[in-house]
Every structure is written in structure tokens, then in C-alpha cells.
Image (cartoon, grey):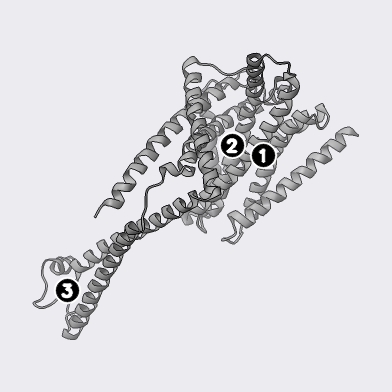
Amino acid sequence: MSFLIDSSIMITSQILFFGFGWLFFMRQLFKDYEVRQYVVQVIFSVTFAFSCTMFELIIFEILGVLNSSSRYFHWKMNLCVILLILVFMVPFYIGYFIVSNIQLLHKQRLLFSCVLWLTFMYFFWKLGDPFPILSPKHGILSIEQLISRVGVIGVTLMALLSGFGAVNCPYTYMSYFLRNVTDTDILALERRLLQTMDMIISKKKRMAVARRTMFQRGEVQNKPSGLWGMLKSVTASAPGSENLTLIQQEVDALEELSRQLFLETADLYATKERIEYSKTFKGKYFNFLGYFFSIYCVWKIFMATINIVLDRVGKTDPVTRGIEITVNYLGIQFDVKFWSQHISFILVGIIIVTSIRGLLITLTKFFYAISSSKSSNVIVLLLAQIMGMYFVSSVLLIRMSMPPEYRTIITEVLGELQFNFYHRWFDVIFLVSALSSILFLYLAHKQAPEKHMAP
């Protein structure tokens, strides 16, 4: 009876997660497109539902909700389903929709879809060769063999996003990095833009007058064709007539310049708005957050470097370790175990909420940036693949933030994985991503004033 009640709670929550994923798909990702393949919408929503269910089970693990055997069963079932989706279903449908967009392969799209899926499986399996994640004790299609490879991809993705976010967040929030933009700078750039537009209009008028004159003289009908005609039009022109080819080249160059000037003008306006926004109360609040995250970024880079150099991985969750250091330093009586459990629960909850929110925002921006009516189905499936791997890897890493007594079922379900490897791998990729982001943003920030100062 207890198992049925626990299962009904899990099924109800999964239906709610599925409905939220469905609404997000319709109102955010596909609000500008017509839904033609409902299987894509179902796969995305199911992936989102089972991904959120893993985070729900983590919270249940800390709070002690549901029976222990029920949690173990749903952990096992949830991981099996999410791995089935990520390794078998989503890659196959990605290949299927790619082949469907190629007219020559349309009649045999099922065959070529299988070929693409087998190619994916080959490289997915070979991914385990250079990493210490293989376990000879388990079968080829065991959970350990699959989740170990999914974890490598997901942890790499998490580390790349975390490294860039740790650097980009203070760069975006802090007013220190804003360029000093005045109304004079904007007016000067707008004047250059208007002058360029006037030159384009003038040259197009000259071309129109020249074409009308040539038409009246009958030169259009007698114009030689072929390569010789093209060479003649470039190298020679009739007395008193315009060289249309050279003028067209000048117009093309001026139009490209006008596009660049327009983008620079819009960038200056956006920077000016950010300067004015930074003077408001909300802007000062985000400026403070920028300084906080900059300190966090430096600390995270420093700790990642120390972990890599000393080849160490924390055995105790950060909350318990921090409370122990504080209590020993102050010499006060404090129930470390009791408060570490509650603070760990709050910390894990914050990590889960911010991870889901941040990933959905990133997926939405990425989809709008590269999607089209033909590629939208493939891109949504790719986003579902990234989302599932991201959340599975989050479970691998969040495990270390939990007190040891709450890791038991998660460790049993995930199997004999090299958890220390994933934390070291995260530190390496995070460090590379953060340092690369610092270099990129430094060059971009340094180049921006020079671009606007150019005549």
C-alpha cells in the first residue's frame, strides 16, 4: 500500500513536470513556429519531466519523503528511462529529421537514420576509451556503462557553461567595465551614418540616370554578353556614360559600411542605457552582485587550480566542512550534524532551482539565435539531449554537496562510478573555460573603444 501511494506521488509530479515542459515548448521555443511533429514536443517534455524528477528525488532523499525502497525503485526506473531517451531515442530522431530535410535521401530516410544512429553509438562508446570510467564488472548496456559516458559529456558542458558564466556575469553586471559613452559620441557616429546613406542614395541616382540614358541610346539591347561583355564593361565605358560596374561596387562597399555603423550606433545606445540603469537602485544592486561574483570567480579559479595541482577531491560536503571550521575557530557549542543537514537542503534546493532556470534561459536564447522553420525540430531535439545530459551530470556533482548519509541510495543507483574523476574533470574544463573567457572578454573590451574612436 505504501509503495502505491509513493508511486502515485511520483507519477503526479511527473505529469506536472511534463505539463510545464509542454507549456515551455509551446510558449517559448515554438511560439513563432507551427508545430508539425508532435513527437518532438513529446520527447522534449518527457526529457524535461524525468530530468526534474531526478532533482525531486534528491530533495526527497534529504527530507526523507517516501519509503526508502520506493525511492530506490524510482531512482532506478528514472535513470533507465532518461538513459533510454538520451542514448537511443533522441539521437535516432535527430538523424531521422536531418535525413528528412535532404531530398535525395527522403525515400530511404529510415535506413540512413539507422546508419547515423549507429555512427553516433560508435563514437559514443569510443568516448569511454581515454577516460577512467570503464568497469569490467558490468555488461555492455548496463546503467554504469551508459551513465559514465553521458556523465563525461554532461560534466564537460556544465564546466564550459559555468566557466563562461563565472566570468561573464561580473563583466555584465559591474558598471566598472562600461565604456564612457556621451551624446557627442552618438551624434558623431549618427552623422557618419547619415553621410554614408546620402552617398549611397547619390550613387544609386547616378546609376539610375545612367541606365535610363543607356536605354534611350539603345545601349542596353546591344550590350555584348558573356565573359567578353563583362570584361568590356569593367575596362571601358562609352564617352559621357557612367561605369555602372564600378559604381555598383562602391555602393556595395558603402552599404556594408552603413550596416557596421548602424550596429555600432545601436551598441552605443545600449551602452548609454546601461550607464543610466547602473545609477538606479536596481542597477547598484546588480553592480554589488557583480563584485560578489568576481570574488567568487577568482576563488573558484584558485580552488580549481589547487585541486588540479594537488590532485584532490573533497570527501566532506562544503556545508559541513565550513560549519566545522567555523565552530572550531570560534570554540562554541554547535550541533554540526543537525544544522548541516538543513543548510545542505537549502543549498541543494538553490542549486537545483538556479540550474533549471539558467539552463532554460540559455536554451531559449540559443534556439532563437540559430533556429529556422526547417531546422527547428533538429535543434529542439539537440536541446533536449543537452538538457538531459546536463541534469544527469548535475546529479553526479550535487552528490558531493550532500551529507554522506544522504548519498547512499544515489551511490547504489549510479553504481561503481569514478566520482572523483568527474569532479577533477569539471575543475580542468572549468579552469580552461574561465581563463579563455577572461582572455576573450579582455580582447573584446579592449577593441571596442578603438573601434568607436576610428574615423
- Quarter that holds the C terminus: bottom left
Q: Secondary structure at mark 3?
A: loop
Between residues 133 and 364, which one lies in front from this camera angle? 364
Crowd around label 2: few <14 · some 14–19 · many ≥20 (10 Å): many
- Quarter that holds the N terminus: top right
Question: What residue occupies the far bottom of the structure in this picture?
Answer: 216
Callout 3 amino acid: Pro
Residue 379 visible, this angle: no
Q: Residue at x 30, y 60 (%)?
A: 188
Q: Check contact, mark 1 vs mark 2: CB within 8 A.
A: yes
Q: CA distance from mark 1 to mark 3?
A: 67 Å
- Closer to the N terminus: mark 3 or mark 2? 3
Q: Secondary structure at mark 2?
A: helix
Q: Is residue 41 left or right of residue 104?
A: right
Q: Which mark is residue 390?
A: 2
Q: Check contact, mark 3 vs mark 2: CB within 8 A.
A: no
In percent of width and height, residue 13 lies at 77, 43
Residue 38 visible, this angle: yes
In percent of width and height, residue 108 lies at 53, 51
Q: Residue at x 17, y 84 (%)?
A: 218
Q: Which mark is residue 51?
A: 1
Q: Is residue 314 above or below residue 8?
A: above
Callout 1 amino acid: Ser
Between residues 299 and 121, which one lies in front from this camera angle? 299
- Kindly identify which residue carries mark 3: 224
